[in-house]
Structures are given as structure tokens and as C-alpha cells.
């Protein structure tokens, strides 16, 4: 049973518009959530995170929203830029756990068209 | 940049041969991890280490072993490679609640 799901394998948006990437989780013990971005032939890089005590975290063009009751989080990128084209992974870790042992979703490939 | 390097970056090997992948970090981090990533899938944890000679299994550890005799090096060994172990392998370190990944090793088992 996959505990972290990214149901959209791909997303295409126009430059300047908003990109919304979604992630659902099933494990109620998860209390820390992260988004990573990955370019081809490179390792993933940390993008933004959110603790379960918050419902929103913002960093520049990137905002993550957490809805604990729905076990759902989303990453908003505004405005989207062609350089944002990458695979985005959602990850979650459990209370008191090691964030390095996060459970990852399968990723969403974002394409931003000029 | 967390100073993580992986070697080799690419390797092609034959079924049944042993393979060792190396992860090297320069910043004395305690926590190190090995993941594999397969097409259409996220990263899955193979093994991890919380210090020298302190290692444990992740969710997909069968067929893999690790060793950490020095803080800076974390080795992943496939004792007898199989085609199902064809994958991209990432090493990572963790700092507070973030992970930093190496550039990956693409392993093909024929």
C-alpha cells in the first residue's frame, strides 16, 4: 500500500501561470512533509517543507499548503518559469522520526511551456 | 552543495557479479542513506547509517549490503547483481530535516 501518492504523473502549464502539484498521504503518523525537485541526470534537491503544526509555508514563488484532515498537500508555483520544468517529489516523515527516512511519492513531471 | 560525490557515475555489469558503489561526503555528516530510483517511481530507501559501523535496513534491502568504516564513506554492495537491480542509485545525507543527495550512479545489470 503506497503511503504517499502523487496521482498526476505529469502536468503542463504555460509560463507565467500557476502550477499546482498535489500529494496525498495515508499514514496519520506523518508530521513533516517535503518537496524535492529533480532535473535529469542530477540528484533531487530540497525545495520546501512544512510541519504538521502549520497549514502553509511560503518561500518566494513556492508555497506548500497542508490539509491535515484531508491528508493532502499541494505545492503552488507562481509564476511558473521554464526553468521549473523538472520532476517534483513529495515526501513525508513520521513523528519523532528521521526525515532522512522519508517516504516518497512517485513524482510529477512538470513542463512549463514558454 | 553538501559535498557529496558518488562513484562510479555509470556502470554496466553482468548478472551474478559483485558490484560496489561508493558515496563520499566531505562535511562530516553522521547520517547517510542509499536510495534507488526506478522509472515512474519515487526514491526507495535501501540502507542507512547513523555513524561509523552503525547501519540498518531500509524498505528494499534484500540483495544489498552496506559498510561504513569511516564517517565520510558509505559503500553499497550488490553481492550478486541481478537484472532487477538495474536502477539509478542515490546517496544522501541529512541535515536537520532536509536531505541532500549525490548526483547518482546509473547501474545496468545485463
Image (cartoon, rainbow, N blue to C red):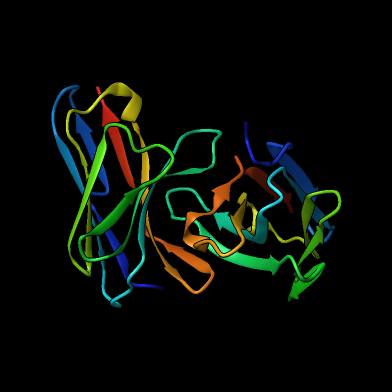
Quadrant assignment, res B93: bottom left
Q: Is residue B19 left or right of residue A86?
A: left
Residue B19 vertical placement versus B66 (above, below) = above
Above or below — where is A99 with respect to A10? below
User: Left or right: where does residue A16 sit relative to residue A59?
Assistant: right
Residue B103 visible (yes or no) = no
Above or below, A59 against A90 in this view is below
Give the x, y percent position of residue A102. Answer: 54, 54
The quadrant in which residue A51 appears is bottom right
Tell me: B100 left or right of B4: right
Q: Quadrant of the N terminus of chain A?
A: top right
Residue sitting at x 53%, y 61%: A97
> How many numbered badges does the structure rendering display?
0
Could you tell me residue B96's position as x and y percent?
50, 74
Name the spot of residue B33 as percent of width and height, x first.
Answer: 36, 56
Residue plotted at (40% across, 37% down): B60
Q: Quadrant of the C terminus of chain A?
A: bottom right
Q: Write down the quadrant of residue A11 in the picture.
A: top right
**Residue B27: image location, x then y, percent:** 30, 78
Residue A39 in the figure: left or right of residue B58: right
Q: Is residue A12 visible?
A: yes
Amino acid at each position: 500500500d503506497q503511503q504517499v501518492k502523487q496521482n498526476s504523473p505529469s502536468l503542463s502549464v504555460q509560463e507565467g501561470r500557476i502550477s499546482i502539484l498535489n500529494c496525498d498521504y495515508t499514514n496519520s503518523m506523518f508530521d513533516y512533509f517535503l518537496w524535492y525537485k529533480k532535473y535529469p541526470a542530477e540528484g533531487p534537491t530540497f525545495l520546501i517543507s512544512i510541519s504538521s503544526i502549520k497549514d502553509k509555508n511560503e518561500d518566494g514563488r513556492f508555497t506548500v499548503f497542508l490539509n491535515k484532515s484531508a491528508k493532502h498537500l499541494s505545492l503552488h508555483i507562481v509564476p511558473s518559469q521554464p526553468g521549473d520544468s523538472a520532476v517534483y517529489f513529495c515526501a513525508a516523515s513520521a513523528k519523532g522520526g528521521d526525515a532522512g527516512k522519508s517516504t516518497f511519492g512517485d513524482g510529477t513531471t512538470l513542463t512549463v511551456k514558454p | 552543495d553538501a559535498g557529496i560525490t558518488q562513484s562510479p557515475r555509470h556502470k554496466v555489469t553482468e548478472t551474478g557479479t559483485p558490484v560496489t558503489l561508493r558515496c563520499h561526503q566531505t562535511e562530516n555528516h553522521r547520517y547517510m542513506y542509499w536510495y534507488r530510483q526506478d522509472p515512474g517511481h519515487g526514491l526507495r530507501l535501501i540502507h542507512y547509517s547513523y555513524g561509523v559501523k552503525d547501519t540498518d535496513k531500509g524498505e528494499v534491502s534484500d540483495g544489498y549490503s552496506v559498510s561504513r568504516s569511516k564517517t565520510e564513506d558509505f559503500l553499497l554492495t550488490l553481492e550478486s547483481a541481478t537484472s532487477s537491480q538495474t536502477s539509478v542509485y542515490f546517496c544522501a545525507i541529512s541535515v536537520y530535516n532536509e536531505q541532500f543527495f549525490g548526483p547518482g550512479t546509473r547501474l545496468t545489470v545485463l
